[in-house]
Image (cartoon, rainbow, N blue to C red):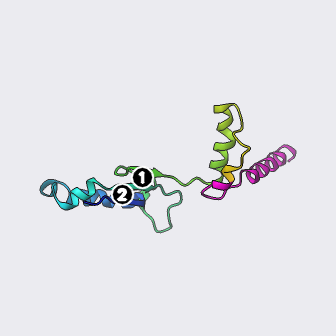
Amino acid sequence: MPRYAFLGVRPCDLRAIFIQDRVLGNGMNAGSAYAKRRSMAFIIAVNCTEPGETCFCGSMGTGPASGPGFDLALTELTGPESAGHKLGTWHDQFGSSGCGCGRCIVWCPVGIDITEEVTALRAEAVGLETG
């Protein structure tokens, strides 16, 4: 039987899969083809960082963070979070900036240029000091 991977499953989709599992994979259906395929599925969930205007996952308790039923969950990092990681906690953890080679600029999945972020943060800090 082939194995399946589901990529980009949202929290509300996880809830729907959970309900399908209860109906099609438990009780009398515990040994069904669905239950066998589902037991071999690999689910990569994606937490919603900005739920859409029509989403009601928060009020239904199904998001925006992924609930149970996934094998791996991803969360999109926005610019400040990424820069905060690289510039804020890195030095505390390793005693150096961790910067210099430029690989983070080339390989950043969301296109963040750390040098631009540092320049913007410095300008903001100077503005706060003088303003």
Residue 21, quarter of picture:
bottom left
Judging depth in this view, the residue of 90 and 20 nearest the camera is 90
The image position of residue 18, as x and y in percent, is 29, 56
Q: Residue at x 63, y 43 (%)?
A: 85
Q: Which residue is mark 1?
A: 66
- Dot placed on the residue nearer the N-terminal end, 1 or 2: 2
Residue 102 tag number:
none
Closer-to-camera residue (100/39): 100
- Asked if one can make out residue 124 in the rendered structure from this viewpoint, the answer is yes
Amino acid type, mark 2: Leu
Q: Do residues under tags 1 and 2 come within 8 Å of each other at their CB atoms?
A: yes
Residue lying at the far right of the rendered structure: 130
Query: In the figure, is residue 103 to the left or right of 18?
Result: right
Number of residues whose C-alpha sits closer than 10 Å to that of mark 1, classed few (under 14), some (14–19) or many (20 or more) = many
Label 1 residue SS: loop
Which residue is at a point 42% across and 55% down the rendered structure image? 45
Residue 111 included in the magenta stretch of the image: yes
Indicate the secondary structure of the residue bearing disc 2: helix
Q: Which residue is mark 2?
A: 14
Q: Position of residue 74 (x, y in %)?
A: 48, 52
Q: Is residue 24 above or below residue 117?
A: below
| Magenta span of residues | 106-131
- Give neighbour class at mark 2: few <14, some 14-19, many 20+ (Cα, 10 Å): many
Residue shown at 25% from the left, 58% from the top: 37
- Residue 15 counted in the magenta span: no
